[in-house]
Amino acid sequence: MNTNAEYDQIIAKARRIFELKMKDYGPSWRIMRPQTVNDQLYIKAKRVREIEMTGENLVGESVEGEMYAIVNYSLIGIIQLRHGFSDDVDMSADEATRLYDTYASEAKELMQRKNHDYGEAWREMFPSSLTDIILTKINRNKSIAAHNNVTLISEGCEGNYFDMLNYAVFYLIKSSGFEKK
């Protein structure tokens, strides 16, 4: 098990999805306000939880696809926080992809630090626990947004986006079969 290599493979696939979506839509998400990004994350994570709890998937789209969407929407959330949202598409696809790469790199560095301190505890967790933690982080961001993005003691929305991204990557590592190799 090589967390860094596994992480890189998951991020590479997420980035490829991001690139293809950018070819289809461009950075149309630039108009999303923070609560909209949080709601997009919510519907993805909520669907995963429903499938985990019921065992039924009537839409047919994969749980893994939803987790890749969580990775990408988390990075979009970070971009929106650091660069603000816009009333129109004010960024090129190349600029959006450059920012994606920058913040994905920051997420990996954070993962490495936390993974060191926590001893890869996520490997012993149930995938459903990772889903629940992601949903908790989303609800935290919704609460923070309701308070005009002002926090008294917590790390704020950006930290939650980085954590959601990393928990989604861990979920994907666990579900991809890396651990069985």
Image: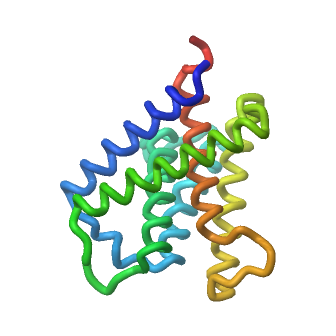
Left or right relative to 55: residue 37:
left
Outermost residue toward the top in this view: 181
- The percent coordinates of residue 30 (x first, y second) are 34, 74
Looking at the image, residue 32 sits to the left or right of residue 172; the answer is: left
Q: Which residue sits at x=23%, y=61%?
A: 93
For the view shown, which residue lies furthest in the left direction?
Answer: 23
Quadrant where the image shows the N terminus? top right
Which of the 4 image quarters holds residue 76? Answer: bottom left
Q: How is the image coloured?
A: rainbow
Q: Position of residue 163 (x, y in %)?
A: 64, 53
Marker count (numbered): 0
Q: Is residue 55 above or below residue 85?
A: above
Question: Residue 51's spot in the image, x, y percent?
Answer: 60, 44
Quarter of the figure that contains the C terminus: top right
Nearest the camera: 5 or 165?
5
Question: Left or right: 162 with respect to 71?
Answer: right
Q: Residue at x 31, y 62 (%)?
A: 96
